[in-house]
Image: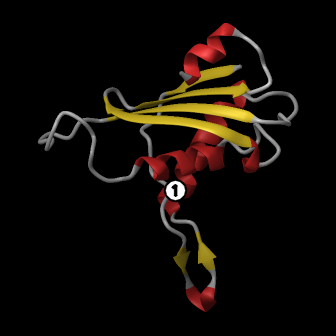
Amino acid sequence: MIRFTLSVAPVAKGRPRLGRGGRVYTPDETRRFENEVRMLARLYKPEQPWAGPIGICLKFSLPKPKRPKCNEPICRPDLDNYVKAVLDALDEFWIDDSQVVHLSATKEYGEPEINVMIVRIAEENEEQERVWQ
């Protein structure tokens, strides 16, 4: 199991943009965020990318707006766009994204950070069973 916290404000994956000459590119904010996550997470990266089925648990803590509409972050950006940005940044942890067979993600208000837990599904331990329930 790999578990770590990144002290960085989450950024949602931006939609690809069409540039001059029909060239498609990733928005600058998304690219900068993914690079920052990649650099911070390298401390926790396995020596070799993992093979086999993987489960990932992500918790995104977002800064609370000055005038929130409610106590839960039910506004944009969507949770799945935060997930996409982090999974793309952590692509050095596994061989291919298709290995992710279990995914759990939440977003909440709090001190801006991202909590990450990655487990090999084949691992047999009590903590893994507790996490996925």
- Judging depth in this view, the residue of 104 and 129 nearest the camera is 129
Vertical order, 110 against 74 (above or below): above
Query: In the displayed structure, does residue 79 sit left or right of residue 17?
Result: left
Q: What's the residue at 86%, 28% (across, down)?
A: 47
- Judging depth in this view, the residue of 3 and 66 nearest the camera is 3
Most distant residue in the top direction: 126
Q: Residue 111 is drawn in which quadrant?
A: top left
Vertical order, 86 against 6 (above or below): below
Q: What's the residue at 33%, 32% (across, down)?
A: 108
The x, y position of residue 9, in whole percent, is: 42, 38
Identify the colour scheme used.
Answer: secondary structure
Most distant residue in the front direction: 133
Identify the residue position indicated by label 1 in the image: 30
Q: What's the residue at 44%, 41% (across, down)?
A: 10
Query: In the displayed structure, does residue 1 sit left or right of residue 73?
Result: right
Q: Residue 91 is drawn in which quadrant?
A: top right
The x, y position of residue 74, in whole percent, is: 27, 45
- Label 1 is placed on what type of residue? Thr
The quadrant of the picture occupied by the N terminus is top right
